[in-house]
Image (spheres, coloured by chain):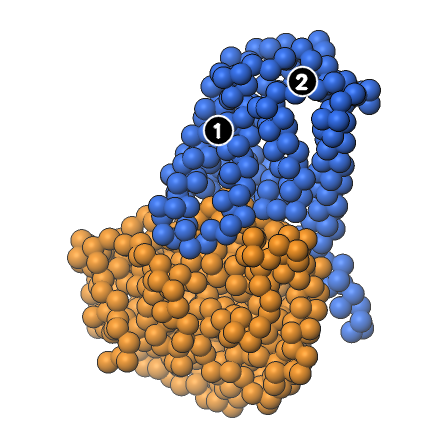
Amino acid sequence: MADFDVPEIKEYIEVPEPRVGVTAHIAPFKSQEKFQEPLGFPGELVDNWQEKAIEKMGDLLGKYRSLQVFLDICVHCGACTDKCHYFLGTEDANNMPVARQELLRKVYRRYFTFAGKYFPKLVGAIDLTEDVLDQWYSYFHQCSQCRRCSVFCPYGIDTAEISMAAREIMDSVGVGQKYCNEIIGKVFVIGNNLGLPEPALADTLEGLEEEVEEDTGVKVRYPLDEKGADILLVTPSADFFAEPHVDGLIGYGKVFHEAGVSWTLSSKASEAANFGMFIGSYENMRRIALRIREAALELGVKRIVFGECGHAWRVAYSFLNTLAGPFDFLDPNYPVPQHICEFTYNLIQEGKLKFDKSENDHMRLTFHDSCNVARASRMGNFEGGQFVIPREVIKACCNHYFDMEEDTTEEATFCCGGGGGLLTDDIMEIRVKGALPRMQALKHVVEENGVTHMAAICAICKSQFSKVMPYYGFTMDQIVSVHQLVSNAIILSDAPAEQEAAEG
Amino acid sequence: MSIVTTLYVVLFYAATVILVGGLVMRIKKYAQTPAPLKIPTMPAPLTETGVAMRMFREVAFFESLFKSNKWIWIFGYLFHFGMLLVLLRHLRYFTEPVWFWVEWIQPFGKYAAFAMLAGLLGLWARRFLVARVRYITTPSDHLMLALLVGIVLSGLGMKYIAHTDIISLKAFALGLLHFSPQPLPEDAFLLVHLALVATLMIVFPISKLLHAPGVFFSPTRNQVDNAREKRHIAPWAQQLEAGER
């Protein structure tokens, strides 16, 4: 099935002895001129690239306190060394967070610190050479920016910040990653990552309306570009057709229907994800975020709600106000933006949604905390709401729910292995190996509690798991959307009686 | 004044200037570099008070390290809090009359030196015994530990092997503080101890010891989780916006 060895799932997570260079060969396809230029990056490696790269590093050091402080203060204590899923899955020494950071830090020391300039050997400082650039390209694309290391670092050093900076430096000298940069280009031109134009979206949504009506007898609407709607829903474009994503979208529509609110999707902002974050580019991230502001203004909505998407929710929750705010033209009674899980949870709290939990009785569920929801954002108005709210939504519509082991959930959750711009088939090996810790925790609840399905609230997690679960002996349909569960169990109050009877 | 005394007087003034000047420059840099995005590691406190508490738990209890690795936590804690007590105990050389609480902690400070040593040796052992830590260790990491162990051992040497003339030493220390240099007792342990301490002061602002002031500037630990309620924007990002209008 694969041209690499799939790691074996053991009973417990075993911390491997580090091995040098075992995944040095894994690197995603490089970008080309046509994908680089629309983002404002050179098309190929520039002539004086060393000089330019160091200049860019200096520029970023002045712009990001995180980078400046994190490059200075690591003491090499080793607390993070066993925390990265890519290290646990690959055993490659450079996949230990501190070692990954050192790839950049060594160069920082050489050019920006007294000790590195005059005593390079002593402090481990090196010149920026072509070999170093190659290492950067490999290993900074073996980080999914999941922030697990940051939780466990005594100084909160976040490798995601380092990876983002490294990727931006590389982009600035013409070494970009095809997957991310091509996708960002599509967002600028067409409006979403998958390049679905407006007519295709309209068609898909019409199809969904028919499907839901056939299923339930209720005319649940999936509107596109409807001016004057109350709510703009921004959701990852995978929700429009991929499995199990689309079942989630069906669920959002049913919840809006039951809530009796008017809502719309936008063809302009037909993508929640913001890959500008993956490549560390504030400018590109901002340009992508501004589409949402523009769409909200054009459609005259009062609220913005985001669909199930992990990194998207980070940019939405933590950065949207910064990048595209202030949102003073929206209804101040609601947070901007709101997560669909918050929306559904609030309705459940108010007793406005009714469920037939038995509709999900064919499943025994667990929940995968998506890394960027867990460690880079929040839901609700209390600390840790991002852990409670999705679980409460699941429990409201399912009878059988079981959590995975404590050190693999909530703030200690393991990334799916495909986040941060790694969800591309040219680096399948790192994706499969990086999924090991999660697969292990899943296997545990499968054996202990008879769990059959894992729910997630991230488009990347869903796509990644449907692809890698078969490598570990699971099936691709064992990953489900949270709002798919909602969709299955929700009782539509205007459903025709005979339909309910027939189903019941 | 003897050559040795002159040398140490100059050394300590120079080391102090480098330590203070270097730290001020570094801290200024950290304070002035903007954090353009909200990046607290979640779940994060929703209020300033909450953030102050989080930072307090981080520096007083090493909370994140405790979650992470119990061995590093134990050794790190022994070392740092041993050192804190030892440093406080040393205040008796710089105060006249000696503050009451400095008197009070004297007996504890004595044992703290051993705690400090145990912590340092534990941390050092990890650099040899744990392959992951061995891989990330640089020569300067060993040197830093050697320096600190040297300081502790030379200090213990004065306590348990060859006492130094504490009265003269205190006169020397107070002399430094009042800019009227006094003769330094020329005992081997003391000279080594002081030379190593001065070295530590000099390397502090150009080494990983910057983690001490740096942790307070770590955006993942010092930010409030309020991105939706309050717009957070860096001056350079504001300029970017202004440039477009």
Q: Secondary structure at mark 1?
A: helix
Shade representing chain A: orange
Q: Position of residue A216 (x, y in %)?
A: 32, 75
Residue drawn at 70 percent across, 20 percent down: B184
Q: Residue furthest front?
A: B3
Amino acid, disc 1: Met
Residue A89 lies, in percent from the top left, at 33, 63
- What amino acid is at disc 2? Pro
Distance of mark 2 from mark 1, alpha carbons? 26 Å
Residue nearest the viewer, comparing A453 with A227? A453
Compared to residue B160, the image places residue A261 above or below, namely: below
In the rendered image, the quadrant that contains the N terminus of chain B is top right
Asked whether the residues under marks 2 and 1 belong to the same chain, the reply is yes
- Left or right for B143, reference A59: left
**From this viewpoint, is residue B47 visible?**
no
Along the horizontal axis of the image, is B4 left or right of A462?
A: right
Chain letter for mark 1, please: B
User: Who's blue, chain-wise?
Assistant: B
- Number of numbered discs overlaid on the protein picture: 2
Classify residue A208 as left or right of residue B228: left
Q: Foreground: A435 or A245?
A: A435
Q: Nearer the viewer, mark 2 or mark 1?
A: 2
**Mark found first going from the N terminus, 2 or 1:** 1
Residue at figure coordinates x 31%, y 59% from the top left = A437
Residue located 64% across and 52% down the image: A115
Left or right: A440, with A254 as reference point: left
- Location of mark 2 (residue): B185
Query: According to the image, label 1 marks what residue?
Result: B116
Instruction: Tell me the quadrant of the picture where the C terminus of chain B can be found.
Output: bottom right
Label 1 Cα neighbours within 10 Å, binned few <14 / some 14-19 / many ≥20 = many
